[in-house]
Amino acid sequence: MPGGVSSPVRAFRAVGGTPRFIVSGEGAWMTDADGNRYLDCLGSWGPLILGHRRPEVVAALSAALAEGTTYGAPTEREVLLAEKVRDFFPAMERLRFVSTGTEATLSAVRLARGATGRELIVKIAGGYHGHGDTLLMEAGSGVATFRSEAGSRGVPQALVELVRNLPFGDVGALERLFVAEGDKIAGFILEPICGNMGVVAPEAAYLQAARLLCSRHGALLIFDEVMTGFRVARGGAQEIYGVKPDLVCLGKILGGGLPAAAYGGRADLMALIAPEGPVYQAGTLSGNPLAMAAGLATLEVLDHERPWGKLGEATAHLADEIRALARRAGVAVTVNAVPGMFTVFFCTGPVTDFASARRSDAGRHGRFFHALLERGVHFPPSRLEAAFLSTAMGAAEYEHLLAALPAALAAAA
Ligand code: PMP
């Protein structure tokens, strides 16, 4: 197994040391093979908003498991989950389930090209949409952690030439691109709140400009809310900012800890997807019964408990605490936070895009990460990622984290 892992950032290459082999999780905690317990601020990179083994999710999974694991035929839970997802995301008039966020974004991009008959795709430098060929150049997350802006070898130059990368939040750059090439642009895909260059929230005006320019030039606006969906608000970033995209990509929380994702949007666009239309997309395990059961149980709990306000307050409070502790430790940090996710950047000045995010010092971050790990807190092992909070975290968990932070920040000084 390259790097000994199934996904690159897990290998700890950016922070040094050996990844912990995890044997179990319970609520906000996970336990490694040596019996050490960690407060889980990794949250499986986003899905676990309810923490590990939430009883309602376990019960739904057990019930589904007793019936069967996969049929390759339609099942009722897909319909129930689709209706639920549309209720959370009204922009998804129709949708299709897939298994990973990568599939959701590459399918949305194909649909944008198929619907418009155009080939150019606009994306954000430092955005990450999975590992599809079209979307890897200047991608964030692990791509930036390991290979800088080179993206990946193996992506054909012909595809690279069909992609335009823009700095996040720069309305002028977006306008200039649309003026120059607007009639060739199939779609603009972005995380409306970035999570993969670390957390970076936009000005509302930026998303509004994106909406306006796409509409004016006949391009599709695609919001990748794989990370922010069901987390930053009930209806994701698009609800917070009041901007309606043409297509939406979801994943992570949608599967409640199992592999499920979806893309969807305007009914006229989704009618172009096979078998109704000429844009092909399929999947052996798409809409898998276990994943549908876990996703449905997760969304039902979220809808019942409506934790977003509380999670938002907890995240903002934690960010304030980290800023104060860092000042006391004499270490310069910029903390960006939105409900349920935050990033501690080891640099001064605001972090508003990929260029400013990458100023975060890797050495300081690595020492911070390991000092936390030694004290029983598992953060993401890269400086360009979001840390995640879950509803399983209560007073004891926040105390544990706050107790570990002074030494971790001192280690980074
Ligand atoms: N889009 C976003 C915004 C993501 O954060 C991710 C994964 N971190 C993906 C797409 C890809 O999802 P997956 O890893 O499930 O393919």
Image (cartoon, helix red, strand yellow):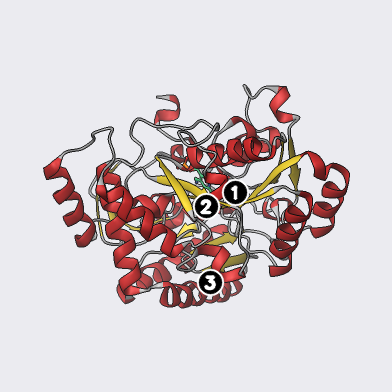
Circle 3 SS class? helix
* Horizontal relation, residue 155 to residue 170: left or right: left
- In the displayed structure image, the side of residue 307 where residue 31 appears, left or right: left
Q: Which residue is mark 2?
A: 367
User: Label 2 vs label 3: CA separation?
Assistant: 19 Å
Task: Using the rendered view, name the quadrant where residue 49 is placed.
Answer: bottom left
Q: Earlier in the sequence, mark 2 or mark 3?
A: 3
Does residue 75 lie above or below 333 as drawn? above
Look at the numbered disc 2 and give the secondary structure of its residue.
helix
- Is residue 8 rendered to the left or right of residue 398? right
Q: Residues within 10 Å of mark 1 (few under 14, many from 20)?
A: some
User: Which corner quadrant of the image does residue 108 belong to?
Assistant: top right
Q: Nearer the viewer, residue 113 or 25?
A: 113
Picture disc at residue 363: 1
Question: Residue 55 location in percent, x, y?
Answer: 19, 61
Mark 1, secondary structure of its residue: helix
Circle 2 crowding by C-alpha within 10 Å: few under 14, some 14–19, many from 20 = some
Residue type at mark 3 is: Ala
Quickly name the residue at label 3.
Answer: 319
Confirm or deny contact between disc 2 and disc 1 (CB under 8 A).
yes
The earlier-in-sequence mark between 1 and 3 is 3
